Amino acid sequence: MPTTEKITLHVRPLSHPCMTARAALDLKGLEYEAVTVETGPHIEQLEAIYGAGKTTVPGMVIDGEPVHGSVSILERLEREVPENPLYPEPVAAEVREAELWGDREIQDLGRRLPWGALHFRPEASGTYTGGGALDPAGTDYAMKYLHMAWKHAGITATRLAEDLADLAEKVARIEGFARDGLIDGDSPTAADLQIASTIRVLLTIGDLEELFAGTAAERIARRFFPEYPGHVPAGAFPAGWVVTEVPATHG
Ligand SMILES: N[C@@H](CCC(=O)N[C@@H](CS)C(=O)NCC(=O)O)C(=O)O
């Protein structure tokens, strides 16, 4: 089975699409070198490898061929090693659609909601780097950093409230994927890995625990990504912003 190609994966710590790519490489039994790209000079470094405008991680170089973005990486890995299929028949097309939905519709929530929650509990930022709650001086620093993160990710209070209001519907949609056998089966699909990494990040937000409790979303997140640092205590978001019930049915 596995290839002898040399594989390099460009990653950043805590990045959930990078977790997706790494899980796919592991599933395919492929060895690779993970290279952490620093925040400052990362744009030039990544563009030099992957092309103009391709400034995000993950990126993968496989036998000299650059492949940018988690969706393209999973597709390329499937071609490299067809065993343990990420797009199993007879549901390959539906899995692909669910994977793309995960990339387009929920992946950004894994950035906006944690940064959003930390604005209200900045001292909890320290838990995401493996420490405890920050002291006042550390909290001052975190507040400046969070301000930049909000700007960079286009977060506003209005956006955050909308994201939270829409989340229950998205959790219901993931229940539907599980019912249709696209995720949460014996072996992970591309949709599992794409959706589960985002949900794993969201599970660090105490305010969302009730919404996710007992759902397929929570199940795949904890199953495929058992470890992820960070915790924002419940009560961070303003009262009334968080929906705690998943709609019963979804088409
Ligand atoms: N949909 C893309 C998005 C990748 C993405 O946005 N990665 C973030 C890290 S989670 C990043 O590299 N951000 C750097 C930046 O925005 O400058 C994928 O799945 O590969």
Image (cartoon, rainbow, N blue to C red):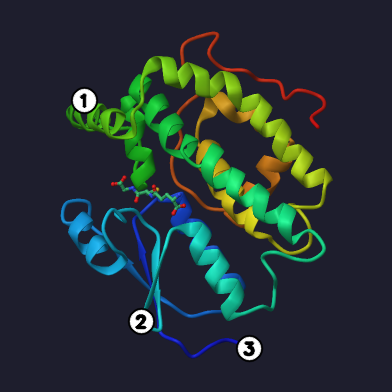
250 left or right of 217 in image:
right
At x 27% / y 69%, what residue is drawn?
Answer: 49
**Helix, strand or loop status at disc 3:** loop
Q: Is residue 187 above or below residue 227?
A: below
Q: Position of residue 201 (x, y in %)?
A: 50, 42
Q: Nearer the viewer, residue 182 or 114?
A: 182
| Quarter of the figure with residue 79 | bottom right
The amino acid type, in three-letter code, at marker 1 is Pro
* CA–CA distance in space, label 3 to label 1: 53 Å
Helix, strand or loop at mark 1 = helix
Q: Label for residue 64?
A: 2
Of badges 3 and 1, the one in the foreground is: 3
User: Taking 104 as reference, is 143 above or below it?
Assistant: above
Residue at (55, 8) in percent of width and height: 240
Secondary element type, mark 2: loop
Question: Is residue 235 visible in this depiction of the protein?
Answer: no
Q: Where is mark 1, residue-wise?
A: 136
Residue at the (30%, 28%) spot, across then down? 150
Callout 2–callout 3 Cβ contact below 8 Å:
no
